[in-house]
Image (cartoon, rainbow, N blue to C red):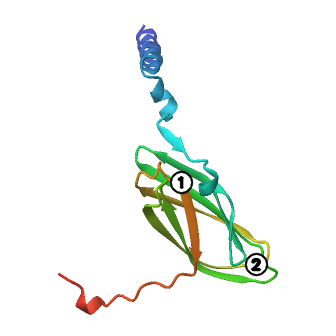
């Protein structure tokens, strides 16, 4: 008798919780399996088109903003016939008026073999959904910072 009661309680709770999930998803379709439709995918040609910088081709194969968090997936390829030392690269993101929204720096410190393809994934909290253009710079010198004379 106790087994039947326990079994019916377990099955009843599974049924109730299963029903409540389907009811919640019907009321709020954006909550389906954690998928949020509040995503801006940027496909503008000036943002995602490949750019050749000194024999290294950069291409944003993923550029999206979701709830103020941007994710940029950049693929870079050494198109030269020799190894290429890639210390770092910058992504300069501008809007349609040419205003710089942000400058991202990726320190990769890699030697790329000829025709070698690598990718990098950057996530940062900044709404760059108005991005209209991306430019790249490679092996940029880091600024000299005088650590002893920093303002307090």
Which residue position is annotated with label 2?
Answer: 113
Toward which corner of the image does residue 113 lie, by quadrant?
bottom right
Toward which corner of the image does residue 146 lie, by quadrant?
bottom left
Q: Which mark is residue 132?
A: 1
Q: Are marks 2 and 1 in contact (CB under 8 Å)?
A: no
Distance Cα–Cα, label 2 vs label 1: 32 Å
- Residue visible at 24% across and 86% down in the picture: 150
Q: Estimate how packed mark 2 is, as few (under 14), some (14 to 19) or many (20 or more) residues with alpha carbons within 10 Å.
A: some
Answer above or below: position of 95 versus 76.
above
| Image coords of residue 93 (percent x, y) | 50, 61
Quarter of the image for the N terminus: give it: top left
Q: Nearer the viewer, mark 2 or mark 1?
A: 1
Q: Looking at this view, name the residue that lies furthest to the right.
A: 81
SS label for mark 1: loop
**Closer to us: 45 or 149:** 45
| Image coords of residue 18 (percent x, y) | 47, 18
- Residue visible at 78% across and 78% down in the picture: 80
**Closer to us: 12 or 109:** 109
| Image coords of residue 26 (percent x, y) | 46, 17
SS label for mark 2: loop
- Residue visible at 17% across and 81% down in the picture: 152
Q: Which mark is residue 100?
A: none
Q: Is residue 75 left or right of residue 97?
A: right
Q: Is residue 109 left or right of residue 30?
A: right
Q: Is residue 75 left or right of residue 16?
A: right
Q: Looking at this view, name the residue that lies furthest to the front.
A: 97
């Amino acid at each position: 008798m106790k087994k039947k009661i326990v079994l019916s309680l377990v099955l009843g709770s599974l049924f109730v919780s299963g029903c409540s999930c389907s009811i919640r998803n019907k009321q709020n379709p954006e909550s389906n399996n954690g998928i949020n439709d509040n995503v801006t995918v940027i496909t503008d040609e000036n943002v995602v088109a490949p750019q050749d910088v000194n024999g290294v081709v950069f291409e944003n194969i993923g550029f999206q903003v979701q709830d103020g968090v941007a994710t940029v997936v950049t693929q870079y390829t050494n198109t030269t016939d020799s190894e290429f030392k890639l210390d770092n690269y910058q992504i300069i993101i501008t809007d349609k008026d040419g205003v710089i929204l942000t400058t991202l720096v990726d320190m990769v410190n890699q030697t790329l073999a000829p025709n070698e393809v690598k990718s990098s994934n950057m996530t940062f909290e900044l709404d760059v959904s108005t991005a209209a253009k991306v430019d790249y710079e490679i092996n940029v010198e880091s600024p000299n910072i005088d650590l002893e004379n920093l303002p307090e």
